[in-house]
Image: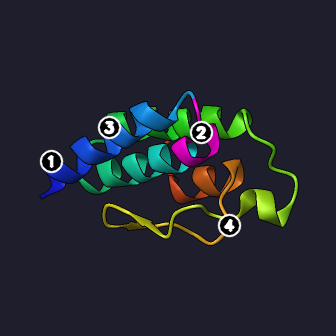
Amino acid sequence: MKEETVARLRRMLAELEKTEPRRAAEVAYALAQTYRRLGNNELAVQYGRKSLALFDKCRMETEEDCACRFVTLGDIALPDLIHQGVVRERLQPLQV
């Protein structure tokens, strides 16, 4: 099941990355958390950094800007509000 979930999330990320960076940032975060749970810290860091880079492309000034677009992705529950600081905090102690 995890392999299917990872493949689906990676496809979603590829589809959203250029057209909807805000939604893609959440998908990248979910991938980072998924890889972290699987024990692959290298890929967790890679996707955590991708999430941060995508969030950097977005306006993140108001609560509405930070409101999560997805409730869950795969088996990852996303926080109600998400931004660069949340990504860094939730992926500790990884160096993202």
Q: Is residue 66 left or right of residue 53?
A: right
Q: Position of residue 83 (x, y in %)?
A: 69, 53
Question: Which marked residue is nearer to the observer: mark 3 or mark 4?
Answer: 3
Q: Earlier in the sequence, mark 3 or mark 2?
A: 3
Q: Which mark is residue 11?
A: 3
Q: Is residue 7 inside the magenta stretch?
A: no
Residue under label 1, please give it. Answer: 3
Residue at screen point 87% across, 59% down: 62
Q: Quadrant of residue 82?
A: bottom right
Q: Position of residue 88 (x, y in %)?
A: 61, 49
Is the C-beta separation of discs 1 and 4 under 8 Å?
no
Q: Which mark is residue 20?
A: 2
Q: Which mark is residue 14?
A: none
Question: Which marked residue is nearer to the observer: mark 4 or mark 2?
Answer: 2
In the structure shown, which secondary structural element does the residue marked by tag 3 occupy?
A: helix
In the structure shown, which secondary structural element does the residue marked by tag 4 occupy?
A: loop
User: Alpha-carbon distance for marks 3 and 4?
Assistant: 24 Å
Q: Is residue 46 above or below residue 9?
A: above
Q: Earlier in the sequence, mark 3 or mark 4?
A: 3
Furthest toward the right, the residue is 61
The magenta span reads: 19-24
Name which residue type carries label 2: Glu
Q: Quadrant of residue 21?
A: top right
User: Alpha-carbon distance for marks 2 and 1?
Assistant: 24 Å
- Circle 4 packing at 10 Å, graded few (<14), some (14-19), many (20+), is few
Residue at screen point 78% across, 56% down: 65
